[in-house]
Image: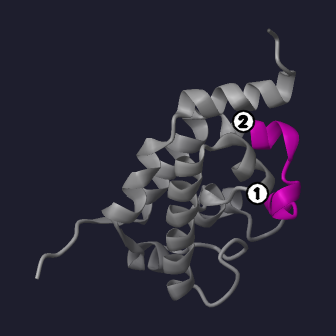
Amino acid sequence: MCEHEMYNYFETLSIVETLMIESGIREFCTIVCKGECCNRCYEGKAACHRNEGRRLACSIFLCHNLLNTIFTNCEYTAYTNASSEIKKVLRQNIDKNIFYTVHTKKIQNKFTIDRQIVSPLSIINVKSVKLKLNTLLHGDKN
């Protein structure tokens, strides 16, 4: 039986965060949504910036409107499949809401996910996504 290579919590978080930053998604959400999509969690005691730092569940979250706007069909499928599986693994280790629960060292250390689940995120064309987001923010300048 062949074992698959696995990513840990921080490797997965790094991949997701790199995608969010390089594509401009993180900046877009900060400018447009301003924390409304996460129910202003950043103001509460369990906020990631007050605890463990950027939280994987939150990093992988994208609203449906944005998902349907910025990704091609293949990218959408890759993203939603990876996101769903990441959240599924988190739910196996967290009894409460995965977004509003501090991801303790114990939770982080238990998290592993098959690289084959996360690697399809690499098909996302970050330059194309960034262009679409800039058009949404500033309109078509052509």
Residue 12, given in percent of the width and then of the height, sits at 43, 58
Which residue occupies the extreme top position in the image? 142
- Judge whether 67 appears above or below 5 on screen: above
Display colour scheme: one colour
Residue 44 placement, left or right of 23? right
Amino acid at circle 1 = Cys
Question: Main SS type for the magenta part?
Answer: helix
Q: Nearer the viewer, residue 38 or 121?
A: 121
Image mark for residue 27: 2
Q: Secondary structure at mark 2?
A: helix
- The residue located at (48%, 78%) in the rendering is 89
- The residue located at (54%, 48%) in the rendering is 75
Residue 105, given in percent of the width and then of the height, sits at 47, 73
Q: Secondary structure at mark 1?
A: loop
In this figure, which residue is indicated by the disc labeled 1?
Answer: 63
Residue 142, given in percent of the width and then of the height, sits at 80, 9
Which residue occupies the extreme front position in the image? 73
Q: Which residues are magenta?
A: 28-43
